[in-house]
């Protein structure tokens, strides 16, 4: 596969994997016997999320819920009843996301539709798109990035920069931007630099960089933010 094909192909490594019917049945069997905290919100209103506890599963796989009540708080009816909702929960150290419908008969019930398991990987690459802006600033020059992981960035630039961005070249005091979030990157190293022809048959330079000596606090924050943005994308696309 040549470099131009790599650029046009989407990232094929799954960030969210759909749960198979067999896995789904096992998950419901487990939720039927083990109380699990479930967070529910309306689309685009995650800040107003409400927390529930599972209290069993019916034969039709509707999940029985009870509102999580904190000490000294008043019991009140959920404002999400009879609405389509988004859902997330953690079970056996795996994170799940879904959509469904919250309704009430004699009990408060949640009927899930698609269920995805979150595969949290440090090497997951987040691609730039209409709602994800990625930029790397090197020597006071800003480049629009193609994709990013917690370990590095890939961007495209003019072929005239071939000598500047030779493999193993190191740059210091760089800055990274993911939408509104900014990160200080103390050192980067060029790990790939190759000429390719774009869709208009123009020659350009594909550059891949690796972050070096990234402080643990920045590394953790960067990894966390990449996964937050990726989760937002999949929720918007799937639900």
Image (cartoon, rainbow, N blue to C red):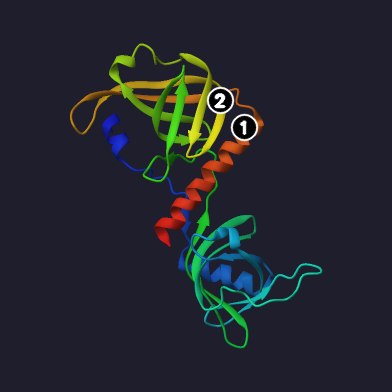
Q: Is residue 5 left or right of residue 117?
A: left
Mark 2 lies on a secondary structure that is: strand
**Pointer 2 residue:** 185
Foreground of the two, 214 or 185:
185
Q: Which mark is residue 218?
A: 1
Whether residue 170 is situated above or below residue 8 in the rendered picture: above
Q: Residue furthest bottom?
A: 106
Regarding residue 75, the answer to whether it shows in the image is yes
The quadrant in which the C terminus is found is: bottom left
The quadrant in which the N terminus is found is: top left
Q: Residues within 10 Å of mark 1 (few under 14, many from 20)?
A: some
Q: Residue furthest top?
A: 163
- Residue 190 figure quarter: top left
Foreground of the two, 232 or 114:
232
Q: CA distance from mark 1 to mark 2?
A: 8 Å
- Residue 161 figure quarter: top left
Q: Residues within 10 Å of mark 2 (few under 14, many from 20)?
A: many
Query: Residue at the location (62% across, 75% down)?
Result: 78
Q: Are marks 1 and 2 in contact (CB under 8 Å)?
A: yes
């Amino acid at each position: 596969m040549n470099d131009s094909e790599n650029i046009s192909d989407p990232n094929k490594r799954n960030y969210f994997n759909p749960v198979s019917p067999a896995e789904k049945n096992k998950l419901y069997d487990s939720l039927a016997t083990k109380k699990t905290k479930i967070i529910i919100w309306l689309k685009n209103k995650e800040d107003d999320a409400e927390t529930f506890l599972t209290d069993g599963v019916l034969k039709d796989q509707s999940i029985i819920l009870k509102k999580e009540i904190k000490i000294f708080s008043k019991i009140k009816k959920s404002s999400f009843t009879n609405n389509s909702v988004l859902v997330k929960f953690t079970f056996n150290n795996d994170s799940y996301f879904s959509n469904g419908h919250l309704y009430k008969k004699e009990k408060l019930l949640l009927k899930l539709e698609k269920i995805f398991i979150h595969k949290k990987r440090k090497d997951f690459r987040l691609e730039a798109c209409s709602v994800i802006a990625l930029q790397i600033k090197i020597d006071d020059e800003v480049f629009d990035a193609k994709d990013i992981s917690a370990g590095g960035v890939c961007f495209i630039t003019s072929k005239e920069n071939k000598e500047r961005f030779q493999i193993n070249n190191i740059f210091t005091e760089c800055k990274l931007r993911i939408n509104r979030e900014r990160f200080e990157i103390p050192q980067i190293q060029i790990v790939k630099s190759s000429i390719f022809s774009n869709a208009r048959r123009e020659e350009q330079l594909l550059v891949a960089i690796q972050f070096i000596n990234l402080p643990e606090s920045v590394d953790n924050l960067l990894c966390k933010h990449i996964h937050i943005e990726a989760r937002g994308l999949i929720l918007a696309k799937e639900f």
